[in-house]
Image: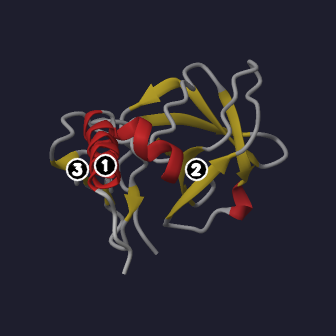
Amino acid sequence: MTVYSRRSFLARSVAATIGVGVHLSHPGRAMGGWFGWWKKTDVTGESLAVGPLSGFAEGKWTSVQIGKIAPSGKDVTGLKILVWRQGPKAYAMSSRCTHRGCRVEVRTDGTFRCPCHGAQFDSAGRVTRGPATEPLTWYATRITDSGVVVVETASEIEPPSGLSAK
């Protein structure tokens, strides 16, 4: 068993208290470096190619990690977009919780949950449980002639109706 002097014990206690204080006052800064939940990249106005339509499973959400520099020169490395394929169409939604910007998790029933503060969203991205008060953001998509899905973040859209899971 290690025995600490009073001075060493107090120094370690103060350091631990400061660390907890930083985490509680700025959880994004403290947790973001460890888990990457708080990647608050501004993607407004970007056209992001997220992959071929054939690469997305029919009737389920796919989380796409963007790992590149956007056409505008913005670094979007680490950004995640949620893509849903329904037949020959693709739909896209932001994976960023509208409360503090954490990445939401896709649940097995097609709903979403924020791991940071517990906000929950239905399958259309509408808030079902706070602390978030705004729905998840939907983006317009287009399919190129070569079959690549492009997410147009300049065009926010209303949630489409009739998406059905397979």
Dot 2 or dot 1: first in sequence order is 1
Furthest-right residue in this view: 146
| Position in image of residue 75 (x %, y %) | 70, 28
Closer to the camera in the image, 78 or 128: 78
Residue 98 found in image quarter: top left
Which quadrant holds residue 115?
Answer: bottom left
Please report whichever mark, 3 or 1, sits nearer to the chain's N-terminal start. Answer: 1
- The foreground one among 133 and 25 is 25
**Measured along the vertical axis of the image, is residue 154 above or below residue 26?**
above
Pointer 2: residues within 10 angstroms few (<14), some, or many (20+)?
Answer: many
Label 3 CA crowd tier, 10 Å (few <14, some 14–19, many 20+):
many
> Which residue type does callout 3 highlight?
Ala
Residue where numbered disc 2 is placed: 90
**Which numbered dot is residue 61?**
none
Q: Which numbered disc, 3 or 1, marks the residue closer to the eye?
A: 1
Q: Which mark is residue 119?
A: 3
Mark 3, secondary structure of its residue: loop
- Mark 1 secondary-structure assignment: helix
Between the C-alphas of marks 3 and 1, the distance is 43 Å
Q: Residue furthest front?
A: 5
The mark closer to the camera, 2 or 1, is 1
Q: Nearer the viewer, residue 116 or 54?
A: 116
- Which percent across, then down, holds residue 21? 26, 39
The residue wearing badge 1 is 7
